[in-house]
């Protein structure tokens, strides 16, 4: 396993942004309109039964049983659940499209707005990967959540300070388990993008293999953008339009380093189809060999 140069990956991401046309900030703006904008517009017309019930109960004018009976109707909750499901699936597809754009941006391939819709051309694989990744992450999270819940209940019942402290430690452990689990599947979308014939489960398996020994580097890479993220709300969203492609291109560089052993665009090398060499134990990786 080699050394991941985080500063170089981020520098190359900035360089790729400077030479890109259309500008990544404009593409990111369109992406946000397609994701957050459309989601917000749809939800504006859909009644959230949980928010509605909360407002009624906080008003103090209604009994809880009446609120539950009249707010959580089959029609309202069914419509809300269906819309949430469709928006979640749509979000996976649009996010995959932006990952596609970011990977091509990092490689200097001059992507454009059309790449934001790349997920629709492989919608089955995208939805399967999204479902499986979220399912596996949720199952891993149970390993941390269950001990925390048991200790917390025991602390409340026994009024034990010691058990309460142990519950807090279990909570931190649960968060760590979730982070580690999510990092296991961090590269799934990239494998799907580089390998048109690869299925969702196979991409997940390759991601788990590729991330062995690299989770700490991935976590530090994400953490290095925290300062910019904290400043973004004070810039009325302008900084976010720069930060999102910067961070996404840096993550794409991380993938190329871990899996292919180099940053940037492909270059043909003798004996290496596609110009990439493997940098992890999964063997030589290229679109033709996986």
Image (spheres, rainbow, N blue to C red):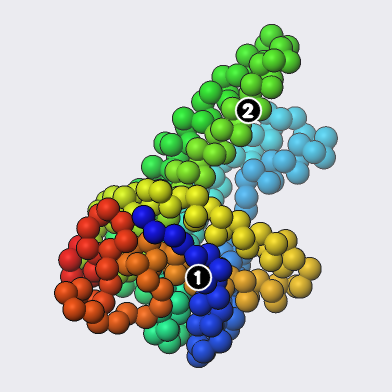
Of residues 69 and 223, the one nearer the viewer is 223
Quick one: SS at disc 1?
helix
Q: Identify whether 93 is placed above or below 110.
A: above
The quarter of the picture where residue 166 lies is top right
Where residue 114 sits in the image (x, y, percent)? 42, 82
Left or right: where does residue 165 sit relative to residue 6?
Answer: right
Residue 253 in sight: yes
Of residues 290 and 199, the one nearer the viewer is 290
Where residue 95 sits in the image (x, y, percent)? 46, 66
Q: Distance between the residues labelled 1 and 2?
A: 34 Å
Quarter that holds the C terminus: bottom left
Count of number-bearing discs: 2
Left or right: where does residue 19 sit relative to residue 50?
Answer: left
Quick one: SS at disc 2?
helix
At horizontal 55% and vertical 59% (from top left) the residue drawn is 221
Q: Identify whether 185 is placed above or below 61.
A: below
Q: How crowded is mark 1: few (under 14 residues within 10 Å), some or many (20 or more)?
A: many
Q: Which residue does the numbered mark 2 point to in the structure image?
A: 169
Task: Mark 1 vs mark 2: give the one in front.
Answer: 1
Left or right: where does residue 24 sit relative to residue 168?
Answer: left
Q: Residues within 10 Å of mark 2 (few under 14, many from 20)?
A: few
Residue 30 in sight: no
The quarter of the picture where residue 17 lies is bottom right
Residue situated furthest front in the rendering: 2
Where residue 263 sits in the image (x, y, percent)? 41, 73
At horizontal 64% and vertical 38% (from top left) the residue drawn is 70
At horizontal 45% and vertical 40% (from top left) the residue drawn is 138
**First in sequence: mark 1 or mark 2?**
1
At horizontal 43% and vertical 36% (from top left) the residue drawn is 140
Residue situated furthest top in the rendering: 158
Q: Which residue does the numbered mark 1 point to in the structure image?
A: 9
């Amino acid at each position: 396993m080699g050394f991941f140069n985080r500063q170089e990956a981020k520098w190359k991401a900035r360089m790729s942004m400077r030479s890109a046309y259309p500008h990544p900030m404009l593409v990111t703006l369109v992406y946000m309109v397609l994701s957050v904008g459309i989601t917000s517009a749809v939800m504006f017309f859909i009644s959230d039964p949980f928010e509605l019930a909360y407002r009624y109960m906080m008003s103090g004018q209604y009994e809880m049983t009446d609120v539950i009976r009249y707010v959580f109707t089959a029609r309202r909750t069914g419509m809300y659940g269906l819309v949430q499901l469709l928006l979640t699936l749509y979000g996976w597809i649009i996010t995959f499209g932006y990952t596609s754009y970011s990977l091509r941006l990092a490689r200097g391939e001059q992507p454009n707005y059309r790449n934001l819709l790349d997920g629709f051309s492989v919608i089955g694989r995208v939805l399967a990967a999204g479902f499986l990744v979220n399912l596996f992450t949720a199952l891993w999270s149970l390993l941390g959540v269950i001990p925390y819940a048991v200790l917390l209940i025991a602390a409340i019942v026994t009024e034990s300070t010691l058990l309460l402290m142990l519950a807090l430690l279990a909570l931190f452990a649960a968060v760590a388990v979730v982070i580690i689990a999510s990092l296991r599947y961090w590269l799934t979308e990239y494998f799907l993008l580089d390998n048109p014939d690869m299925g969702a489960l196979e991409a997940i398996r390759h991601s788990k293999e590729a991330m062995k020994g690299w989770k700490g580097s991935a976590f530090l890479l994400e953490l290095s953008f925290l300062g910019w993220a904290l400043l973004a709300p004070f810039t009325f969203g302008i900084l976010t339009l720069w930060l999102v492609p910067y961070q996404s291109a840096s993550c794409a560089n991380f993938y190329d380093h871990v899996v292919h052993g180099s940053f940037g665009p492909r270059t043909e090398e003798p004996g290496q189809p596609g110009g990439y060499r493997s940098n992890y134990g999964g063997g030589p990786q290229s679109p033709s060999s996986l």
